[in-house]
Amino acid sequence: GDSDSSKAGGLRTVFFAYDSSSLSSQARSTLESNVEFLKANPSVEIQVEGHCDERGGVQYNLALGERRAKAVRDYLVAMGVTASRVTTISFGKERPLAFGHDESAWGQNRRANFVVTGK
């Protein structure tokens, strides 16, 4: 399961500001909850997927998605999650969650979601 569909246990998707891979205070709060879940379930392995909105070129958004996924992974590891449990991948703008062409949709697409890859 994945956090976008609320089927990844207690893991929740993290959202980003436009053209940013910085973790907001809200993102850090969400990640702290995710860390608690991961510490309570030490056998769970995850993949962090970095995503972008539709604006920007393919290569640019792949790089931005990678920075977002790595920022999330680095935060999890800094909070005590074993690094070998967390992999990252970027999908850039290729897997939108929302299909509109406005800030409401774009805000939902600027995210890092979690996929459980092993239990």
Image: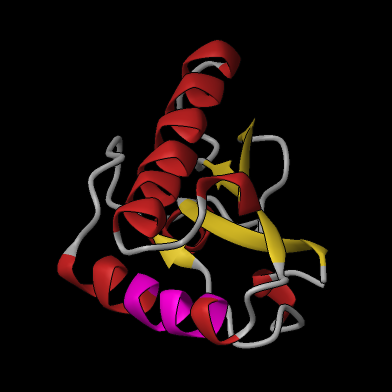
Give the percent coordinates (x, y) of residue 20. 27, 39
Q: In which quadrant of the rendered view does residue 59 lie?
A: top right
Name the residue at the left extreme.
25
User: Main structural element of the magenta stretch: helix, strand or loop?
Assistant: helix
Q: Is residue 79 visible?
A: yes
Q: Nearest the camera: 6 or 85?
A: 85
Residue at the location (71% across, 70% down)? Answer: 44
Query: In the displayed structure, does residue 76 sit left or right of residue 97?
Result: left
Q: Nearest the camera: 75 or 19?
A: 75
Q: In which quadrant of the rendered view does residue 62 lie?
A: top right
Give the percent coordinates (x, y) of residue 48. 60, 50
Residue at the location (26% across, 68% down)? Answer: 28
Name the residue at the top extreme.
59
Residue at the location (46% across, 51% down)? Answer: 110
Query: In the displayed structure, does residue 25 sit left or right of residue 31?
Result: left
Question: Is residue 34 one of those drawn in magenta?
Answer: yes
In which quadrant of the rendered image does the C terminus lie? bottom right
Q: Which residues are magenta?
A: 31-38
